[in-house]
Image (cartoon, rainbow, N blue to C red):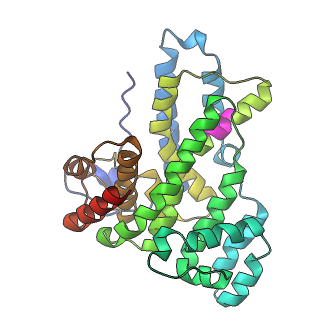
Amino acid sequence: MLRLRPERAAHDRDDAAPKSWVPRDLGFWVERRDYVLAKLDAEWRSSSDAAKWPDVEGWLALLAEEPADVIRQLPAAARDTMGLCDDESLSRAQLADRLSADPALVQSLLKAANGTLYAAGLTSVLRLDAAIDRIGLVGTQAVVLATCLDGLLSKPGGAYDAMVADVWSHMVSTAPLARPLATACGADPEEAFAVALLHDVGKLVMFDRISELRTTGRRPIQLPQAWLSLALAHLHEPLGALAAQQWGLGPVAADAIGLHHRRERPSTTHPLAEVVYLAERADHARRSGVPLDFEGIWTLGELNADQPQCRGILGRYLKTA
């Protein structure tokens, strides 16, 4: 069995105390991806099953290419839309007017604003400017990116399509829980929602490369299920961080995505990563119908958040889910 323990950054090696987060650059995440890929490749080449699954090597080779080639760029319209959200000279009404040209985006923003996360106890909003006011600019950017991603990545075909749908469903259902957890973890609620919505985007990138391999070979791609699950588990964090860097989301979001499984020891103090870690574990428990081992995940993640507050939030969430 492959034993992947990603190397810690130099500033995390000296002692057992949690370290404050230090931003990683693009090069750090390229090195982390390459480290995991090398482990996966070496393990696979030594397997007695390697000859039975020739698509594995082709898939790994695609994932090892330059980040700009591995990760699809956002469409120009999406980049422009996200830029509008950063334009402080635009009023809410002006921003809404500019965004209203995209019916799919309008639908997504109104759906988010009227969902349980933002509209609990409030009247429904039907105007786009009111929706933006309710979910905030960071939340608006997250919805823009999610709407784009929903149609950006191609279908890998066969059973992989169902796996992609499951990943996407998990991402969407993790985001609403991240928002109330943010305060207990010392993070911004809107940023927590946005990062949680994107936290497993690295898996979508990996499935997208299966699509590319399928298109190039003009045939279905076959990868061993157990090994694929292992690869997804260990490689999606650095690829997700690379995607966030490529899309200009900044080091805070990139590192939260790249660190959300809290595998570094001692765990880096990163509030957004802690939020996503907790929200993801809770969503997995809800989806699988098993009790959440709160003490276990808290100890494993070496968290620094307000424990009683987080326990209460997760308890209410799982009780009403």
Instruction: Specify start and end residues of the magenta stretch as a single range.
Output: 206-210
Q: Residue at x 28, y 51 (%)?
A: 301
Q: Residue at x 79, y 29 (%)?
A: 216
Name the image quarter holding the N terminus.
Answer: top left
Q: Is residue 97 above or below residue 153?
A: below
Magenta part, dominant SS: helix
Give the total number of marks visible in the rendering. Answer: 0
Q: Quadrant of residue 145?
A: bottom right
Q: Residue at x 54, y 42 (%)?
A: 166
Name the image quarter holding the C terminus.
Answer: bottom left
208 part of magenta stretch: yes
Q: Mark yes or no: residue 226 visible.
A: yes
Lateral position of residue 277 relative to residue 302, left or right: right
Lateral position of residue 29 relative to residue 213, left or right: left
- The front one of 42 and 153 is 153
Q: Is residue 171 above or below residue 165?
A: below
Q: Percent from the top left, x then y, of residue 298?
A: 23, 53
41 part of magenta stretch: no
Q: Residue at x 65, y 66 (%)?
A: 108
Q: Percent from the top left, x then y, of residue 170?
A: 49, 49
Q: Percent from the top left, x then y, of residue 186?
A: 32, 72
Q: Quadrant of residue 74?
A: bottom right
Q: Percent from the top left, x then y, of residue 141?
A: 61, 70
Q: Mark yes or no: residue 27 visible.
A: no
- The front one of 43 and 315 is 315
- The front one of 146 and 39 is 146
Q: Is residue 9 above or below residue 136?
A: above
